[in-house]
Amino acid sequence: MKRSELYFDLPNRLIAQSRFRDPARNRLLAISRADQGKVTHTGFDRLLSFLNAGDVLVLNDTKVMPARFWGMHESEGQVEITLVTRIDDRSWEALVRPDARNLRKGGKIHLKQQGLSLRMIKKTKSGYWLVKFNGKGIRDFLSRHAEVNIPFYISRQAKLSEYQTIYARIPGSTQCPTTGLHFTRDLLWGIEGKGVKIVYITLHIGGSIVPVVVRDFRDLRMHKEYFEIKPGAARQINDVRRKGGRVFAVGTTTVRALESAAGKNGLICAKKGWTGLTIKPGHRFKTVDAFLTNFHMPGSSHLLMTSAFGGVRPVLNAYKQALAREYKFLDFGDAMLII
């Protein structure tokens, strides 16, 4: 499949630049797979009407960390560092700008905290630098001196709180699972009150947010990200499936984690580790029955996954309607439910 098949014109005015204080004001476009892609236009506050008692809503409880900061390279002067993927407590894959010739293996970057620096270890296969913090107080440094790594299409420096879901719990992401921004505590209480289980899993978002550069999606290889599905979470999801309930996955990251841990029988295995799963049209979904997501960039891997789940033609038709009705796109925009 060519990436050009998922292109469309996205006017800048339709890219949401801020988050509604009341997420119920966001709109929701629902696609029915059982009814030949029929589209329903409603509000996000009507999400409850699509859920039944005995279903399960699966959320990604990763917590966003400030990840963009500056330092002084020993020969190149000031450089900008953006952490992308956490390897361990001290090591990260990172984007370092400018990527000058003198940014070589072993180079040292001094940071705005006494006794703390970065060492350039090596270039990775994905094109980032593997960097390692030397010294103590890494989290304190990031909280004091780093900014949120906002995407290029957001024209202002957003606050960390704007990129945090209300259920964020496990630090490790450099980007937000933005579909979760729609949820309020009242809505979650209402969902539970209807007899729907809410289960949390974790996938730390990093390199999967980079732009797609391949022309043919057959050549696409997604960046690996760390995820964890604990035994209790796997048990609850599997119990719902055995009893005939549906699995509602919130966001592309949740879908990726669930499908990475699904067995041939469609049941979830308790699992932790790295996933490089690339979901394209033709992928056989083993465990996800409904998929809640935002509206994505043209030609993006997120739109590719959405099209794999909902079908290329129905999804593009829904996007055409969303554009005509001026839905808001991307991080702070409106939502789509494929069911």
Image: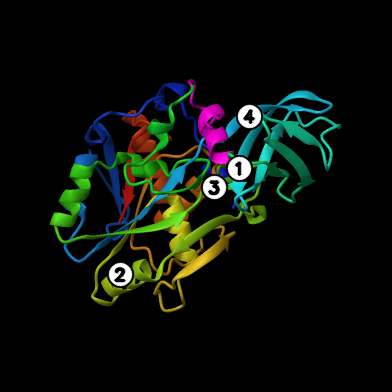
Q: Which amino acid, by three-letter code, is at mark 4? A: Gln
Residue 124 shows in this picture = yes
Look at the numbered disc 3 and give the secondary structure of its residue.
Answer: helix
Q: State the residue at coordinates (83%, 43%).
A: 105
Which one is in front, 183 or 311? Answer: 183
Which is closer to the viewer, label 2 or label 3? 2
Q: Earlier in the sequence, mark 4 or mark 1?
A: 1
Q: State the residue at coordinates (31%, 49%).
A: 337
Proximity of marks 2 and 3: CB atoms separated by less than 8 Å: no
Look at the numbered disc 4 and give the secondary structure of its residue.
Answer: loop
Q: Earlier in the sequence, mark 3 or mark 4?
A: 4
- What residue is pinned by disc 4? 113
Q: Which residues are magenta?
A: 138-156
Q: Which mark is residue 236?
A: 2
Q: How many C-alpha atoms fall within 10 Å of the one at disc 2: few (<14), some, or many (≥20)?
A: some
Residue 147 shows in this picture = no
Marks 4 and 1, how far apart at CA: 21 Å
Which one is in front, 312 or 191? Answer: 191
Look at the numbered disc 1 and give the secondary structure of its residue.
Answer: strand
Horizontal placement of 103 versus 217: left or right? right
Q: Which amino acid, by three-letter code, is at mark 1? A: Val
Measuring from the top left, give residue 314's x and y in whole percent: 38, 50
- What residue is pinned by disc 1? 84
Q: Is residue 324 above or below residue 275?
A: above
Q: Earlier in the sequence, mark 3 or mark 1?
A: 1
Question: Which quadrant of the rendered structure holds the C terminus?
Answer: bottom left
Which is closer to the viewer, label 4 or label 1? 4
Horizontal placement of 133 versus 61: left or right? right
Marks 2 and 3, how far apart at CA: 29 Å
Q: Which mark is residue 301?
A: 3
Q: Earlier in the sequence, mark 2 or mark 3?
A: 2
